[in-house]
Image (cartoon, grey):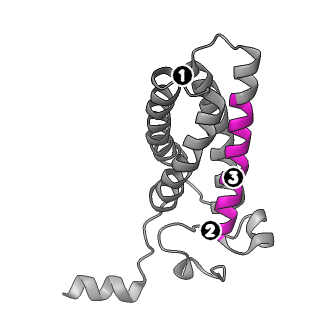
Amino acid sequence: MKQPESPAEAVKGIHNGPPGPLLRIIKDQRVAFLLVGGANTAFSTALFIAVAWIYPDLPSPVVLSIAFVVSLIAVFFVYRKLVFRVQGHFWLDLGRFTLVNLTMFFTNMALLLVAHEVLGYPKIPAQIAITCLTVVINYFGHKYFSFRRPEAVSPKKATEESTT
């Protein structure tokens, strides 16, 4: 996928600045997005495992919450700086980003509670399996909502719309 040379050529509603450092190497925003998401998923899962091992008596929702909050904050900045290079709307982006991730979080929480507390599956393998599902939710949510920017209106299009 060719990177846009101007805002008018940007991926609809997503790309709002020059390619980030990662996109200079990867060249495809979808692949860069998945690589960052994969790295964050690995980081979050490792953090979940570490907290679960260090504090084995913590309820799984607490372990999950710790891993979630730390990785949420870290990956928000990585997506903004390395993948999307969006400018402005920091709080709106963070709010949307958090909303998408909370959707994943509560889905994850419900599935983990059922898998571990109700069905008795070990929490670490259960969490790894659930992660595979929630990655899909995050991908589409961030692609089409979190870092979305309004499509730039060309002067010609604006003139046509105002005369009709």
Q: Which residue is mark 3?
A: 38
Q: Which residue is mark 2?
A: 30
Q: Position of residue 89 (x, y in %)?
A: 51, 51
**Picture quadrant where residue 106 is located:** top left
* Residue farthest along the right direction in this orientation: 25
Q: Which residue is mark 1?
A: 61
Note whether 104 is above or below 53 in the view shown: below
Residue 140 among those drawn in magenta: no
Q: Position of residue 134 (x, y in %)?
A: 52, 47
Residue 43 among those drawn in magenta: yes
Label 2 vs label 1, nearer the camera: 1
Note whether 115 is above or below 61 in the view shown: below
* Tag 1: amino acid: Pro
* Tag 3: amino acid: Gly
Q: Which residues are magenta?
A: 29-48
* Tag 2: amino acid: Arg
Q: Secondary structure at mark 2?
A: helix
| Residue situated in front as seen by the camera: 41 or 132 | 132
| Residue situated in front as seen by the camera: 35 or 147 | 35
